[in-house]
Image (tube, grey):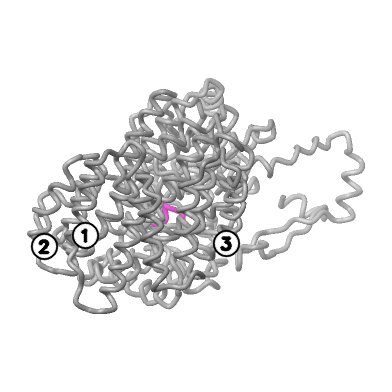
């Protein structure tokens, strides 16, 4: 390039990268003289490769020329042709991502869809699928993602697998096993030798061969290139960091020492100050969100940054970050965390909250449980995996903090991770965890939960807590009523309703009374007691208008449950129900009616049932951190299993897991029998 520029065939300039804030790159322009020269050599112009952008999905790193690595490429390509998982390992900066990026470029040009994710400690399986740009619902049964992908033509790349938090390792291992079972090709790229118990082709990436390493240096350096690359251990990043103005290290020094003593030792005060915020950054963020965005171009010019997600986010090169952090004392590290907290707490969004909480936990702050509790509703859905990691890290500092234990266990149950929840409460015998224990018992399908409830509630002193537990268990139990439920099950629920102690406060008392009437109505509907259901509905109408969304919902639900598909007015009832559902603004009522309609139509009008099923706003339901929304989501998956033959098995698995996670073991058992039959 230097030669071409000296001869006047090209010219270069610095320009901003579109969509990447202050990031700059060198742009090369051909001159009129260059075009003339090119015209004389038209037979030497290579064929332009086909466009592959529509085959590359997710956090694809920048494509750069690859030097050498021919044997490694052949080994990986051979494994991928046989759908064998590949484990690529090596130290930071050795060129793992560059090697894989080169391989997937060729595959994409051949028509293979590529999905790439850059992992970190705050990424769970669902977040990884989202980063890979797979368009599919949130799946709790992570092996279901493998069933949903179901394509031997697709290649998945999991970069930085060593960064996966302990909290999420078992989930990723289940995903990898599922991908292997469905013959989906994938690559695991990271530093460590851990293979997540996945059999496959393992490759340890070492230094470049000398002949290829010298290609990374300016040819004008001449014969000195050989001694330079040998001194730098033929490590690609170390060679790229080399500057002729800085001295070489002693030949027996390692790459880390070179970075520490030469690259960083020669760095200006300005560069070192610009690096500081990046040393404690837990995952890549956009340049504009950093404390001093104007410093980003400076670090980028020194090859100190690593970009991801089509240059939309960046972090420091891991090798540089690790070397710099190791030289900091506790006081200096604490100061960086304090500065980061001050920066991120000024930004009012979920991602900033994750970063702020991360730094508070790393500092070991004593009030972190309060911060986590306050942000719980905001983060549980927006960044469920990251919030789970934060809770796990906070508990490593405060293992006996009951507020943290309860919050972490509840979040684990919401994610259907019952074993994790059990580990959190193991050895803690406190009445404040009664509701968690009851949820676990219902998750595991224990039939004597309602019988044990009375004795468990005797240990709860707080009347409001006792009431919350009773209503919570009742709500789960009523939603678990199915055609297979017997009179004994219904009798137990009725007894529990009668044991509810109403609060003294008049306003709260009315709310609880209304809730109980709604529960009794639901029981009457499920047992086919049409007269009883209408009587209870009339009771509610006396205290609310007919335009009340609850009244509209319960009225339509009663009509649908009592519907005889063969009756003359069936078509009119269904049309009216569909109209009511379309007009309801309350997302839970709307989704419930749409799924009831699906249930009525699936046997007789399948195409119409599919259209109605698609109208359910999954995103709205998933954003609501309430048990009733999670139970409706379980019903959505149950209906999905009845609407499409190819999705039946994985949809049933997901519905079963979701019903179990929300304390509906009877429905889960019923679907398990259906799955067994399938």
Query: Where, by quadrant of the figure, is residue 584 drawn?
Result: bottom right
Label 2 crowding class (10 Å Cα cut-off): few <14, some 14-19, many 20+? some
Image check: 28 left or right of 56?
right
Q: CA distance from mark 1 to mark 3?
A: 59 Å
391 or 584, which lies in front? 584
Q: Is residue 493 visible?
A: yes
Quarter containing the C terminus: top left
Residue 150, given in percent of the width and then of the height, sits at 54, 30
Image check: 466 left or right of 123?
left
Q: Which residues are magenta?
A: 316-321
Sequence order check, earlier mark of 2 and 3 = 3
Q: Residue at x 69, y 34 (%)?
A: 109
**Residue 469 numbered mark, or none:** 1
Sequence order check, earlier mark of 2 and 1 = 2
Sequence order check, earlier mark of 1 and 3 = 3
Q: Secondary structure at mark 3?
A: helix
Q: Residue at x 47, y 73 (%)?
A: 545
Q: Secondary structure at mark 2?
A: loop
Q: Which residue carries the number 2 mark? A: 460
Magenta span main SS: helix
Q: Is residue 211 visible?
A: no
Residue 379, given in percent of the width and then of the height, sits at 39, 63
Residue 353, given in percent of the width and then of the height, sits at 39, 68
From this view, report whether residue 332 is shown above or below residue 588: below
Q: CA distance from mark 2 to mark 3?
A: 63 Å
Q: Which residue carries the number 3 mark? A: 301
């Amino acid at each position: 390039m230097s030669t071409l520029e000296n001869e006047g065939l090209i010219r270069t300039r610095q320009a901003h990268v579109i969509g990447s804030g202050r990031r700059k790159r060198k742009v090369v322009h051909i001159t009129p003289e260059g075009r003339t020269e090119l015209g004389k050599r038209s037979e030497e112009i290579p064929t332009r490769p086909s466009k592959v952008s529509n085959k590359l999905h997710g956090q694809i790193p920048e494509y750069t020329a690859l030097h050498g690595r021919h044997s490694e490429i052949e080994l990986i390509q051979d494994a991928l042709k046989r759908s064998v998982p590949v484990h690529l390992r090596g130290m930071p900066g050795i060129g793992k991502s560059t090697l894989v990026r080169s391989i997937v470029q060729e595959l994409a040009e051949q028509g293979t869809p590529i999905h790439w994710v850059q992992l970190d400690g705050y990424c769970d399986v669902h977040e990884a699928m989202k980063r890979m740009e797979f368009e599919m619902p949130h799946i709790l049964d992570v092996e279901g993602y493998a069933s949903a992908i179901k394509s031997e033509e697709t290649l998945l790349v999991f970069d930085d697998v060593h960064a996966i938090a302990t909290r999420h390792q078992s989930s990723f291992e289940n995903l990898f096993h599922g991908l292997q079972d469905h013959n989906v090709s994938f690559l695991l790229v990271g530093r460590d030798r851990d293979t997540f118990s996945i059999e496959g082709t393992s490759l340890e990436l070492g230094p470049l061969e000398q002949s290829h390493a010298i290609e990374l240096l300016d040819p004008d350096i001449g014969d000195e290139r050989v001694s330079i690359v040998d001194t730098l251990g033929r490590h690609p990043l170390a060679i790229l960091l080399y500057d002729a103005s800085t001295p070489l290290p002693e030949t027996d020094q390692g790459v880390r020492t070179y970075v520490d003593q030469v690259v960083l030792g020669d760095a200006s005060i300005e560069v070192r100050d610009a690096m500081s915020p990046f040393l404690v950054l837990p995952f890549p963020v956009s340049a504009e969100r950093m404390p001093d965005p104007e410093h980003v171009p400076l670090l980028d010019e020194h090859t100190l940054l690593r970009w991801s997600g089509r240059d939309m986010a960046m972090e420091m090169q891991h090798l540089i970050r690790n070397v710099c952090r190791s030289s900091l004392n506790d006081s200096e590290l604490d100061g960086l965390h304090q500065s980061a907290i001050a920066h991120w707490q000024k930004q009012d969004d979920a991602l900033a909250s994750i970063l702020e909480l991360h730094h508070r936990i790393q500092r070991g702050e004593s009030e972190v449980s309060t911060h986590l509790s306050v942000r719980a509703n905001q983060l549980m859905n927006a960044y469920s995996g990251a919030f789970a990691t934060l809770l796990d890290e906070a508990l490593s500092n405060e293992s006996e903090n009951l507020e943290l234990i309860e919050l972490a266990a509840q979040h684990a149950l919401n994610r259907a991770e019952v074993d994790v929840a059990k580990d959190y409460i193991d050895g803690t015998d406190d009445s404040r965890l009664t509701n968690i224990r009851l949820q676990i018992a219902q998750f595991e399908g224990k039939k004597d939960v309602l019988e044990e409830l009375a004795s468990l509630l005797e240990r709860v002193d707080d009347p409001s807590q006792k009431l919350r537990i009773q209503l919570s268990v009742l709500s789960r139990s009523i939603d678990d009523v199915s055609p297979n439920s017997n009179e004994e099950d219904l009798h137990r629920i009725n007894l529990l309703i009668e044991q509810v102690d109403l609060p003294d406060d008049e306003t709260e008392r009315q709310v609880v009374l209304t809730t109980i009437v709604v529960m009794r109505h639901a029981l009457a509907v499920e047992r086919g007691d049409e007269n009883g259901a209408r009587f209870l509905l009339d009771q509610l109408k006396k205290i609310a208008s007919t335009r009340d969304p609850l009244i509209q919902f319960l009225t339509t639900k009663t009509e649908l449950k009592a519907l005889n598909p063969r009756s003359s007015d069936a078509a009119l009832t269904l049309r009216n129900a569909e109209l009511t559902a379309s007009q309801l603004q309350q997302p839970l009522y709307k989704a419930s009616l749409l799924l009831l309609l699906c249930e009525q139509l699936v046997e007789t009008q399948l195409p119409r049932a599919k259209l109605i099923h698609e109208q359910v706003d999954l995103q709205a339901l998933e954003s609501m951190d309430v048990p009733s929304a999670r139970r409706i989501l379980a019903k959505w998956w149950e209906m999905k299993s009845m609407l499409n033959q190819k999705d039946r098995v994985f949809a049933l698995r997901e519905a079963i897991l979701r019903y179990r996670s929300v304390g509906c073991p009877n429905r889960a058992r019923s679907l398990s029998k259906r799955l067994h039959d399938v």
